Amino acid sequence: MKKITDLLTTTKIISITGNETVTITDITADSRQVKKGSLFICLDGATVDGHTFAQKAVDAGAVALVVSKDVTVSSDVCIIKVEDTRQAMMDIVPSFFDYPANKMRMIGVTGTNGKTTTTHMIRHILRSQGHKVGIIGTIHIMIEDKSYPIHNTTPDVVDLQHILNQMVNEGVTHCIMEVSSHALALGRVSGVEYDTAVFTNLTQDHLDFHKTFENYLAAKCKLFEQVSASNQVKTGKGAVINIDDPYGHRVIEATTAPTMTYSTQGKGTLNAHDVTMTSKTSTYTIEFDGKQYPIKMNTTGLFNVYNTLAAIGACLYENISMEKIDEALQSFRSVPGRFELIEEGQDFAVVVDYAHTPDGLQNILQTAQEIKESKMIVVFGCGGDRDATKRPIMGRIAAEFGDTIFVTSDNPRTEDPNQIVKDVEVGVKEGLREGSTYEVVVDRKEAIKKAVRSARTGDIVIIAGKGHEDYQILKDRTIHFDDREVAREALKEK
């Protein structure tokens, strides 16, 4: 609970009318979440104007409104007028919850690919040392072993502060977050002070939102600018950066925090070499601080070597020794939907992966190329209402590696799925190798079943794009759809 006058010291206001003595018990920008004692923030969004819900919020129990336009309500509620309600929300909400991020170690992981696996590796290592850990990411929110659903990789500022406050109340010592470029650009992480910032990689994605790659890079760099900002209240800062990535040097330039780089090419302060992989495991040697550490992982793929290095770097900043980290990693298992093997006793491999960017798709197909015994069968599509320029690029990548390619739907959203697959098909035709074939099967379920039916001994079937997701977003509805369930069903039928 906070007095409204205490909260208003955190943001710039134009005027206050009505009852200025009220006490706030909750904050929301969603009129459906208003309860007695709430402060309702009227956001003027792209499709909905929160000001039109002012009276509804008051009827539901709101005792104060933050507005940027004049509103008329049938009650003597406190009306705080500001220039920008979104900025006011970013200022007020963390203060209302007493800045919960300042009461935990905050590790932020950003990059195009690898965020989910990296955060789960960090969680696994920290918990092995007795720390209480929370995680906020693409798949879910976790507080220790309890899992909660999530709708954005990084929730909006109200939801995020609610979650962080809950973590503090439950005794969490470390919170690990996937920090999306959208969240950094839109200020969703306002009021969050990070202790360690991790950069995995940067390849083309989200240009529908950022417009240019330079804007996308600049958004990612905000996390590293913040971790070394001058107005920090916590100490022990650090940055962990993939120096093999072409943009790693740009990220280094964005921070003055102590920096640890990682590499598989001998260029980092943390290096992996002598990498050997099977379809299910990988072994390599890590070199750090003049010593060698043999590592054996129950994950495969060079991309997972990079994810492991990123996680190790973050945990070294938490003062966990390499010996303890190595010990913990031996019991780590892959994350759902990340190069997840689907086993039903078949004599060929079926892998489900979340890869939905050009780089992500190339990573898993390169890994499959290294471990396949015979042919590679690829099932993938591209989402609607997202960066359309990557569609032919991903088509070319699939054709470069796949022996048989099934181009299908992903989440078409409001777009025509037939047009999306046509965009992808352009790239497939350009990259198709002699002897390789492709087929367009718009129905994703049928495409997966065809791929599984066509597989022979020693083949590897890659089903890319949705990974852990258990839904398909269509124009007028969202339906249940899980690639892993469909693959299992197809395997049992076969």
Image (tube, rainbow, N blue to C red):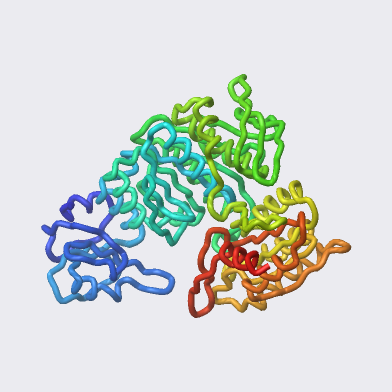
Is residue 79 visible in this depiction of the protein? Answer: no
Residue at the extreme top of the image, as rendered: 290
Residue 359 vs 432, above or below: the answer is above
Direction from residue 372 to residue 12 in the image, left or right: left
Quarter where residue 285 is shown: top right
The total number of labels drawn is: 0
Task: Please report the residue visible at 51 percent of the width from the left and 53 percent of the height from the top.
Answer: 181
Residue at point 52%, 47% (across, down): 110
Image position, residue 375 (x, y; %)? 79, 57
Q: Is residue 214 left or right of residue 148?
A: right
Q: Nearer the viewer, residue 277 or 77?
A: 277
Looking at the picture, does residue 323 appear above or below residue 337? above
Q: Residue at x 48, y 41 (%)?
A: 225
Locate residue 46: give its quadrant: bottom left
* Residue 485 falls left or right of residue 190: right
- Quadrant where the C terminus is found in the figure: bottom right
Residue 450 in percent (x, y) is at 70, 70
Q: Which of the pair 444/270 is nearer the observer?
A: 444
| Most distant residue in the right direction | 434
Q: Percent from the top left, x then y, of residue 361?
A: 67, 56
- Closer to us: 242 or 461: 461
* Image vertical order of residue 96 relative to residue 260, above or below: below
Residue at (60%, 68%) from the top-left corner?
Answer: 410
Residue 347 position in % (x across, y down): 72, 56
